[in-house]
Image (cartoon, rainbow, N blue to C red):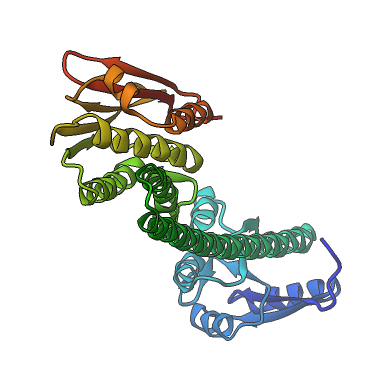
Amino acid sequence: MPERQSPIRVLYVDDDVPLVRYIQKALSRRGFDVAHAATREEAEVQITAGGFDVVALDHYLADGTGLDLLTALATQGDGPAVVYVTGSADTKVAVAALKAGAADFVPKTVDDDFPVLLESALLQAVEQSRLRAQKEAAEREVRLARDRAELLLGEVNHRVANSLSLVGSIVGLQSKSVTSAEARTVLAEAQARIFAVSLVHKHLYNTGDVRFVDLRDYLSALLSHLQTSMQADGFGAKLTHDIQAVRLRTDASISLGIIVAEWVTNAFKYAYPSGGGEVRVKLVQVDDQFVELTVADDGVGCEQVAQDKGTGLGTRIVSATAQSLRATTEYLDVHAGTVARVRFPLVLE
């Protein structure tokens, strides 16, 4: 134990006054400052007043037992360490004292070893108390640092979400000012991708968990926005979804959102050239390792969509994004319509 600049202050609680005087002299020679309390009530008053590093507590007192004092001290919270002292040969007393919060136990004897054993127990109790206080202080610092970091990350996500929303709004305004239908389509697609990313950051800000995203909340909000936007642009399909509650890592959630935005907007634009229909989005966790998402429609089918689509940029974006997810994608022609499916691992290393 590091050398102290001031003596260790001990409160010796015992109604055996001659023994206390003997212990006071023995410990004073070893650098301790020993005060005395003869009763439980007197001890409580002195401990409450503070200033003691450790308490040596006898079992038998005039107004009860040391166990009663230990119980009372436990309700007060932070206080000095307690070394339990008694001449009782019953080991149950020692066990009860340790369970009640005593740091150590020393049997009271009449030989010269007693002050030595007591000194050792007192020193160890003080050192344990010091280490515990340092540990608690360090843990408080860690909690404060974590809280500050979480607050900062929340603010960062809030600002990123706002900045991306601003960029998306600018792209939307730009799309209204161009005369080319193809340019408007490209800008609208870019706006949907920007929104998919910004929504993740908004989700992180609202939930406070920057590591994972709840896909049910995130995709439901994204799909609601996509449906509103596409219907406002004159596409009459109806969007339904069935999203399981799956938590996915943040960066993977962004990638998945981009894929969903691409497939859903394509289904709205190309699946039903003659009018309204239904676009269905489903996400399920197929087992402990994999998640599967499908976007299905009852429209004209993959081959016709491929002929109608423009630059192919969206397909390249989906392909590149799927690689970051370590996912497999496929497009299925069914008896009526198309099913786009992506399957990816739940845990990405």
Q: Which of 54 and 291 lies nearest the eye of the viewer? A: 291
Extreme front residue here?
Answer: 179
Q: Is residue 185 above or below residue 122?
A: above
At a point 69% along the width and 60% down the height, the residue shown is 131
Q: Position of residue 297 (x, y in %)?
A: 20, 27
Q: Position of residue 142 (x, y in %)?
A: 61, 60
Residue 40 visible to an observer of this rendering: yes
**Residue placed at 48% from the left, 26% from the top?**
319
Quarter of the image for residue 16 reads bottom right
The quadrant of the picture occupied by the N terminus is bottom right
In this picture, is 28 found above or below 98? below
Rendering coords of residue 307 (x, y %): 33, 22
* Residue 140 or residue 92, whichever sits in front: 140
Query: Along the line of sight, which residue is nearer the eye, 323 or 190?
Result: 190
Quadrant of the rendering where the C terminus is positioned: top right
Quadrant of the rendered image containing residue 26: bottom right
